[in-house]
Amino acid sequence: MDQRLHDAAIQGDVIILHQIVKEDPLVLHRVNSGWFGGSPLHVAALHGHADFVTEVLHLNPELTEVLDSSQRSALHLASAKGHVKIAQTLISANPDTCLARDKDGRNPLHLAVMKGKVDVLKVLVQACPHAAQVTMDRGETILHLCVMHDQLDSLKQLVNTIKSKEFAEAKDGRGNTILHLAVANKQIEVLKYLLTNATVDVNLANASGYTALDIFAQIRKDMKISDNIIDSMEDELQKAGAIRGKDLTWVQWLPKKKETLMVVASLIATIAFQAGVTPPGGVWQDNSNGHIAGEAVMAYNFPELFPHFLRANTMGFVTSLSTIMLLTSGLPFKRKIFVCILVVLMWLTITSMAGAYAISIIVIAPKIYKTSLGHTTVIALTVWYSLMTILLLAQMVRLIGKAFEEEHSRHLVAKRIQKFSTVKSLLRHLNGSSNSVQLSHTNV
């Protein structure tokens, strides 16, 4: 670049610019991409000389496409410096420069966010909203940059302008959302904003299967002292219904299976109701021989089995109705306890209906098959109840173990806090003793 032209661009001297162009009309047309300092347009944009930029563009509009040695356009530099008027001028001359990417894969919007230039960001997003959704080379979105560089105002501007759930929940190359980064960086204000104003799922997992609560738990584990920010983050995550990655299967399982569970529970309730009013073997049709019309034949022919049938059938009917009520209650199934209750109800329903079915088969089978069917039924029920018992015990052991683990973790945190408090008191005591000694020397 001509040295006089470079100096004129630094000073923003339009008069000298015209003198140089008058002497050499092609001086602005010999500028190529890749120069270390870029074009005169780069220099003027960097130093904020709006009039000089306007005049250069009037003489050669194609300079908007020229890139410096870092592959940055003049709009990159103006955006990074926050020169709103220059950015508007450059966009008017060539709107496509909003999409130009430097050697690090960043467009002008990315640089505006990194430097916290919200006013320029507004102009750029309005001119080219698509540029805000361009990801960088490692998969980071512009929202990731907002969190990484602690630019809450820029984050608010982008979320409010581009109202898209997919945009707010986008993941980087490691599967981290902006919520993961906010927790990892202990940015409580960003976290509060995302949980209260942005449409962000608090329980999204990254590529390692960790949710925001998992990352928080690791931070809490590594903390050796009490931290007000950590305590505030914990409160916000709990209010938002955050869960650990290992518990995601419980939460994701129910929405997918809710409709199926409703159909199954309704079908079982219908069958149980019908079996209750019309037991296997039917009902008596007349009043004779010590029975009354409408009474169950099974109660007279199989008096030892009839009570067991009624108990099993009633249990299946009640638990299936309870399942329907629970599914339609609107309870927060993000809490594992409600999912556990639902699973237990379904276990009881299926087990009860299995028992009622077994008794029904024995009742309606001809005498020639009763013995063999009885043995088969007993074996099948024994296997079934044994399996259910093993599953129930395994679940109880797992829950008890988890409870002990959480209690142990809380105990360790409490010990660390107590130790910190003791050390703090000791330091305060030592400082007090030191001040007393200094005072004694002064008096002497």
Image (cartoon, rainbow, N blue to C red):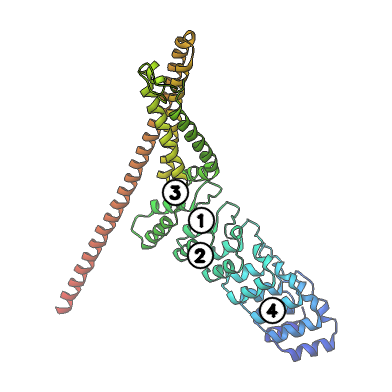
x 66%, y 70%: residue: 108
**First in sequence: mark 4 or mark 3?**
4
Q: CA distance from mark 3 to mark 1?
A: 32 Å
Q: CA distance from mark 1 to mark 4?
A: 34 Å
Q: Is residue 402 above or below residue 114?
A: above
**First in sequence: mark 2 or mark 3?**
2
**First in sequence: mark 1 or mark 4?**
4
Where residue 416 sits: x, y (%)?
30, 53
Q: For the N terminus, which image quadrant?
A: bottom right
Identify the residue position indicated by label 2 in the image: 197
Where residue 72 sits: x, y (%)?
70, 69
Asked if residue 14 can be seen in this view, the reply is: yes
* Callout 3: SS: loop
Count neighbours of disc 4 (C-alpha within 10 A) and say few if under 14, some if 14 to 19, many if 20 or more.
Answer: some
Q: CA distance from mark 4 to mark 2?
A: 30 Å
| Residue furthest left as drawn | 444
Identify the residue position indicated by label 4 in the image: 88
Asked if residue 4 can be seen in this view, the reply is: no
Q: Amino acid at mark 4?
A: Gln
Identify the residue position indicated by label 1 in the image: 180
Evaluate if marks 2 and 3 touch, with contact meaning CB atoms under 8 Å apart: no
Q: Nearer the viewer, mark 4 or mark 2?
A: 2
Q: Nearer the viewer, mark 4 or mark 3?
A: 3
Q: In the picture provided, is 103 more to the left or to the right than 191?
A: right
Evaluate if marks 3 and 1 touch, with contact meaning CB atoms under 8 Å apart: no
Q: In the picture provided, is 379 more to the left or to the right than 207?
A: left
Where residue 164 sits: x, y (%)?
61, 61
Q: Amino acid at mark 1?
A: His
